[in-house]
Amino acid sequence: MNSSDTHIAVAEVLMDIEASMRDLQLWQSQPPPARALASVQPFAIDTLTFTQWLQFIFIPKLHQLLGQGDNLPVNSAIAPMAEEYFRALSIPADSLIMQLRRMDQLLSR
């Protein structure tokens, strides 16, 4: 898959991730406070939930990279984090986890 094809596939998966989050009613209409978004911890674990990190940090960052035509990350392991997060909450997030696995595969080329 060439760079252009990867960018298109990543954009499609981002839309699917958002749709899955909306279906699960995990999409928030208001962002968290700016200080919560400024965390330097992996997944902003100290200030955000996993789904907030997806919505307010991960998805916008990838959209920014796609929009600027920048290189995408070359390694991703988001699905295992999602599996742990949702297992503890008993939320039926199989579709969302599947989309995150697709993203991991696209980015870990």
Image: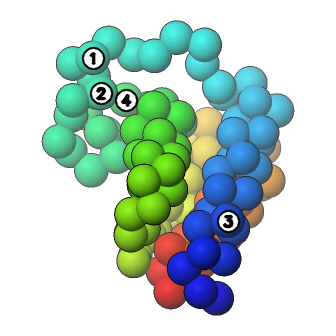
Nearer to me, 66 or 99: 66
Task: Give how far across and how far down residue 35 sits, in percent.
Answer: 21, 18
Label 4 and label 2: CA atoms lie apart by 8 Å
Query: In which image quadrant can residue 26 be found?
Result: top right
- Amino acid found under the numbered disc labelled 3: Ile
Q: What residue is shown at x 40% (from left), y 76% (from top)?
A: 75
Picture layout, residue 9 above or below residue 52: below
Secondary structure beneath disc 4?
A: loop
Q: Earlier in the sequence, mark 3 or mark 1?
A: 3
Label 2 or label 3, whichever lies nearer to me, is 3
Label 2 and label 1: CA atoms lie apart by 5 Å
Query: In which image quadrant can residue 100 be found?
Result: bottom right
Secondary structure beneath disc 3?
A: helix
Q: Earlier in the sequence, mark 4 or mark 2?
A: 2
Tag 1 residue: 34
Asked if labels 3 and 2 touch by Cβ distance under 8 angstroms, the answer is no
- Amino acid found under the numbered disc labelled 4: Leu
Label 4 or label 2, whichever lies nearer to me, is 2
Label 3 or label 1, whichever lies nearer to me, is 3
Residue 37: image tag: 2
Tag 3 residue: 8
Residue 48: image tag: 4
Label 3 and label 4: CA atoms lie apart by 28 Å
Q: What residue is shown at x 53% (from left), y 34% (from top)?
A: 55
Secondary structure beneath disc 2?
A: helix
Task: Give how far across and how far down residue 50 sits, in percent.
Answer: 47, 39
Label 3 or label 4, whichever lies nearer to me, is 3
Asked if labels 4 and 1 touch by Cβ distance under 8 angstroms, the answer is no
- Amino acid found under the numbered disc labelled 1: Ala
**Camera sees residue 93:** no
